[in-house]
């Protein structure tokens, strides 16, 4: 067996649809071609939207499609303490600050500064008295990663951050990481001790993932993942981003076929092979 390790990492915020199946087939095929391993990770850190019922059906769908995993299934909600340690570590390095703003506070401030909607957010810690006052009022906050502090901390290597991108056709390219458009990312959520970027990069490192294969909607995330990996001393995997499954009208399938879960296609009597054909893989 080669040292190639990849993973499929669905979020149980609903049932799987053809787009997820396509992703799982891409991941599985790449692992088999490389003679490597493939792991399953359930990314259920969003406690408001993820449901154990969805996880159950996801596991059934995947085993119906014929997938088997080369190791135990990792359920992220069982590991919040590990993600908290990452945030504590980054805080210990002086790279984070508490952010008490809501999304609409940020939108209003940015509009007042003449910035376009969705402009990268850049903030700083409140002054200590004001921060203590808010903390004693139990005001909700998130931990954010200060990009300016990261730049100072990493020095020249900040500008050398890069990752190896392999296109689905197998072409290699070194991509310079550009974390700036993300601004100061949230490391935690008001309702969860971790945000996606922290949990995903932590687990990729922990599970020894050498190749991340996922949809092109997550291509941008690699730019921030490379930064977190450099800060935490984790290796950077190779990234491949496959095209999303499109409907005949070229629209994203996820929305168009939102009501057609794999479970419902299965109930309609489709075979796993037919699902694979429909997913275009
Ligand atoms: N959980 C993410 C999703 O379902 C995938 C994250 C990843 O592959 O890094 O979209």
Image (cartoon, rainbow, N blue to C red):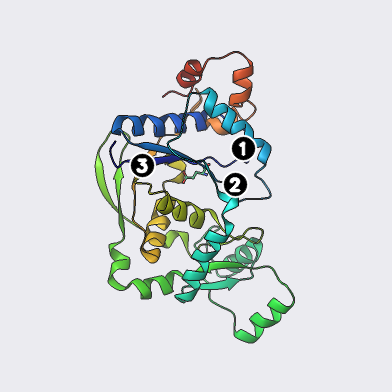
The secondary element bearing badge 3 is classed as strand
User: Residue at image x 61%, y 27%?
Assistant: 261
Q: Distance between the residues labelled 2 and 3?
A: 21 Å
Identify the image quadrant of residue 233.
bottom left
The secondary element bearing badge 2 is classed as loop
Give the farthest residue toward the top.
Answer: 269
- Locate residue 211, reporting x and y percent: 35, 43
Q: Which of the two residues, 71 or 216, is positioned nearer the viewer here?
A: 71
Q: Nearer the viewer, mark 2 or mark 3?
A: 3
Give the mark nearest the N terminus, 1 or 2. 2
- Locate residue 95, reporting x and y percent: 46, 73
Q: Which of the two residues, 193 or 142, is positioned nearer the viewer here?
A: 193
Of the numbered discs in the image, which one, if any, rests on residue 44?
2
Question: Which residue was labeled with disc 3?
Answer: 5
Q: Which of the two residues, 242 or 24, is positioned nearer the viewer here?
A: 24
| The residue carrying mark 1 has its beta carbon less than 8 Å from ligand 1 | no
- Locate residue 108, reporting x and y percent: 63, 65
Q: Residues within 10 Å of mark 3 (few under 14, many from 20)?
A: many
Give the mark nearest the N terminus, 3 or 1. 3
Question: Which residue was labeled with disc 1?
Answer: 55
Give the mark nearest the N terminus, 2 or 3. 3
User: Residue at image x 56%, y 68%?
Assistant: 143
User: Residue at image x 52%, y 70%?
Assistant: 88
Looking at the image, residue 47 lies above or below residue 121: above
- Locate residue 3, reporting x and y percent: 29, 42
Looking at the image, residue 27 lies above or below residue 196: above
Q: Do the residues labelled 1 and 2 touch (CB within 8 Å)?
A: yes
Residue 121 at least partly seen? no
User: Residue at image x 43%, y 23%?
Assistant: 280
Residue 164 at least partly seen? yes
């Amino acid at each position: 067996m080669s040292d190639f390790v990849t993973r499929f990492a669905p979020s149980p915020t609903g049932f799987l649809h053809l787009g997820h199946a396509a992703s799982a087939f891409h991941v599985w095929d790449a692992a088999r071609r490389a003679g490597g391993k493939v792991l399953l990770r359930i990314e259920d850190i969003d406690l408001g939207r993820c449901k154990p019922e969805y996880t159950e059906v996801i596991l059934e769908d995947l085993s119906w499609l014929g997938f088997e995993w080369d190791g135990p299934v990792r359920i992220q909600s069982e590991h919040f303490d590990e993600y908290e340690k990452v945030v504590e570590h980054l805080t210990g390095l002086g790279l984070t600050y508490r952010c008490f703003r809501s999304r609409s506070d940020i939108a209003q401030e940015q509009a007042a500064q003449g910035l376009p909607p969705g402009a990268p957010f850049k903030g700083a810690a409140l002054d200590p008295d004001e921060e203590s006052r808010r903390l004693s009022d139990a005001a909700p906050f998130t931990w954010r990663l200060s990009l300016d502090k990261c730049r100072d901390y990493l020095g020249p290597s900040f500008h050398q951050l890069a990752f190896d991108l392999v296109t689905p056709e197998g072409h290699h390219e070194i991509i310079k990481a550009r974390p700036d458009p993300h601004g100061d990312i949230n490391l935690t959520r008001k309702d969860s001790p971790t945000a996606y970027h922290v949990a995903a990069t932590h687990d990729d490192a922990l599970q020894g993932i050498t190749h991340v294969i996922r949809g092109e909607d997550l291509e941008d995330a690699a730019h921030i993942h490379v930064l977190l990996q450099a800060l935490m001393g984790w290796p950077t995997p190779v990234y491949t981003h496959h095209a999303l499954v499109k409907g005949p009208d070229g629209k994203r399938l996820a929305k168009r076929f939102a009501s057609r879960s794999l479970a419902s296609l299965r109930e309609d009597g489709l075979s796993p092979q037919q699902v694979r054909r429909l997913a275009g893989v």
